[in-house]
Image: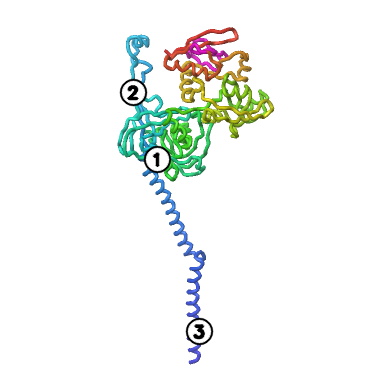
Amino acid sequence: MREGLHRYKLAFLILFVFALGLFAREVWEKLHPLSFPNLIAEDGKRASSEALQLAQKVSQAFSEIAERSSPAVVYIETERVVSRGQAPFDFFGDEFFRRFFSPPKYRERGAGSGFIISKEGYIVTNNHVIEGAQKITVKLADGRTFKAEVVGKDPFSDIALLKILGGNLPVLPLGDSNLLRVGEWVIAIGNPFGLTHTVTVGVVSAKGRSGIGITDVEDFIQTDAAINPGNSGGPLLNLKGEVIGVNSAIFTRSGGYMGIGFAIPINLVKNVVEQLKTKGKVERGWLGVVIQDLTPELAKELGIKATEGVLITEVVEDSPAKKAGLRENDVILSFNGKPVKNASELRSLVLQAKPGTTVELEILRGSERKLVKVQIEAPKKGMLTSRAEIQELQAFLEELGLNVANLSPDLRRRFGVPESVKGVLIIEVYPESPADYAGLTPGMVIDEVNKKRVNNLADFYEALKPSLEKKKVLLGIRTPRGRFYTTLSLE
């Protein structure tokens, strides 16, 4: 009897200890949830759920910004009437048609993007979107269509300001591009290939890009948000839905998106827009120097002990630079304390300086570094030509068969041009072109264009402008054997 009772007590004790162990485990699991495999799985599910919720929130933010911003993004359609270069039927030759028939004309259409910045109907876009347009039509996301007028345009920054007359207009808020950080999410909205209100997402790849050769004033935001032809003029937005840039250009070898797009910072745009709104134009600064990049080879040839900077090849008479005592072969190292690496960067800084302001240049003259104060002035008439105008003039020159350059010290030595000779140097003549047929060759100097003396490329391009319409140019040519005139024509 006692033995049975003893066995009963032992069994009870074992059950009690087992129950106590289960209770202890439950308490331990609650205090230390990561100690057991089943709870690790549960925690994994919880983490996965939190990540999904975070992704959904980001996705929702993109959707809300796109939904809120798209109504203020506009489709811009341009139209101009141009003359066709050649008649379709040439039975009697070009001369016959020129004498007895007007040149055939056709409508050339273009398209781009823009965005509304005020209830008054002001719209920001790129200058190249509306350049040369005789008619500009703006279409809103709600289907409304307006005829737009050009308030002003600035080819140096590639910004244009339009205005439409309409009520209940949606508006995009403008942000602060100085606060933008590399790696930050951005959203591009535009009309690539006519596909209206296309939304793409990416990050800020870099800031302060210059020397790209897109515009005269370059301080681009680089982004990998997909930008294609037709996106030009559209907004680049941050995650607050604020415009922090104007999409302007892409780097491409295929004609389409390759992961590198450029936007003009909105802080630069604000300054341009304000001047266009109040004055119809932008006041640009002028230094009065002809400059070029200082390459290691050029520095070695000229005995300049500098690896970076901008070489002055000519100082314009009665210019701010001349008054400040700047000379040929001086190397500009910095502008108001900011180092300058190339000619494009210096040109951009000068153009952004307001006339009347005094700037400090650090220069290298021989082996001596000096600080020079220069008062920036407004350019004299004909002293400032935008990159867009230059590109048009260069295309015209290419048709004529010419490639020209400033007479730098290096080119003077290479072609044997004396210091006393002024003008621009012919460095290339294309075979079977009007220039080739006229007997022009590399090494000749053009010192007169359309009866105007030229000392440098700035003078040359200004004197060449009337030839764009006439399709012909009168050139004064200087050679070691003498001087002569020749006319080049595309007619």
Front label number (3 vs 1): 1
Indicate whether 128 appears above or below 43: above
Q: Residue furthest right?
A: 367
Front label number (1 vs 2): 1
The amino acid marked with disc number 1 is: Leu
Looking at the image, tell me whether mark 1 or mark 2 is earlier in sequence order: 2
Residue drawn at 38 percent across, 37 percent down: 118
In front of the other: 43 or 205: 205
In front of the other: 316 or 376: 376
Find residue 271 and report its horizontal and vertical position in percent: 47, 34
Can residue 398 be seen here? The reply is: yes
In front of the other: 260 or 138: 138
- SS class of the residue under badge 3? helix
The answer to whether residue 264 is left or right of residue 112 is: right
Find residue 220 and report its horizontal and vertical position in percent: 50, 35
Q: Residues within 10 Å of mark 2 (few under 14, many from 20)?
A: few
Looking at the image, tell me whether mark 3 or mark 1 is earlier in sequence order: 3
- SS class of the residue under badge 2? strand
Please say whether residue 435 is one of the residues in the magenta stretch.
yes
The answer to whether residue 282 is left or right of residue 98 is: right
Q: Residues within 10 Å of mark 3 (few under 14, many from 20)?
A: few
Q: Residues within 10 Å of mark 1 (few under 14, many from 20)?
A: many
CB contact under 8 Å: marks 3 and 2: no
Please say whether residue 167 is one of the residues in the magenta stretch.
no
Which residue is label 2 attached to? 107
Which residue is label 3 attached to? 10
Magenta highlight range: 427-452
Give the quadrant of residue 200.
top left
Disc number at residue 172?
1
Looking at the image, tell me whether mark 3 or mark 2 is earlier in sequence order: 3
The amino acid marked with disc number 3 is: Leu
